Image (cartoon, helix red, strand yellow):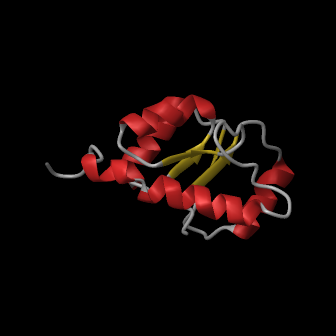
Amino acid sequence: MEVIGTGYEFGHGDDYKRTKEELSRATLIYDDVNEYELEQFVKKLKPDLVASGVKEKYVFQKMGLPFRQMHSWDYSGPYHGYDAFAIFAKDMDLAMNSPVWAHTKAPWESN
C-alpha cells in the first residue's frame, strides 16, 4: 500500500515530525483540511482507497471510491491492539474488492 496523503485536524509540530519520518518524500501531509480541499485532492491524485473520518464517508462513496472510516468505527475496527493488523487487512480487502465496484465507475474514468 502506498500512502499518497495524510493529515491531522489538531496536529502539533511533533505529530508532523513523526509522520514525516514514516512517509515517502512524495506524500502530502496536510493540516486541518476541509471537505472541499480533501475532495479536490482525491480528484487530482485518484487514489484507489480513501480512509478518513465519518463526515467524508458519503462524499467519496458517491464518487465511486472505496472508503474506510478510520477513527470512529461504525462497522469494524478498532485498528489497535493485538488483532489490529488482521482487522485492518480484512477491512481494506472488503473496501477494495467489494462487488459493488464492478457496477460503478469513478468520475475520472471514461464511460
- Left or right of 10? Residue 103 is left
- Left or right of 107? Residue 19 is right
Can residue 106 be seen by looking at this rendering?
Answer: yes
Q: Which residue is pictured at 49% across the width and 53% down the height?
A: 95
Extreme residue toward the left, this view: 111
Q: Which residue is pictured at 71% across the width and 49% down the height?
A: 77
The x and y percentages for residue 111 are 13, 48
The x and y percentages for residue 75 are 64, 40
Q: How many labels does the image show?
A: 0
Can residue 4 be seen by looking at this rendering?
Answer: no
Quadrant into which the N terminus falls: bottom right
Q: Which residue is pictured at 76% across the width and 54% down the height?
A: 16
Image height of 98 relative to 89, above or below: above
Image height of 106 relative to 47, above or below: above
- Left or right of 82? Residue 108 is left
- Left or right of 10? Residue 33 is left
**In the depicted view, which residue is nearer to us: 98 or 61?**
98
Q: Which residue is pictured at 16% across the width and 52% down the height?
A: 110
The quadrant where residue 104 appears: top left
Image height of 26 relative to 42, above or below: below
The x and y percentages for residue 90 are 60, 61
The x and y percentages for residue 66 are 45, 49
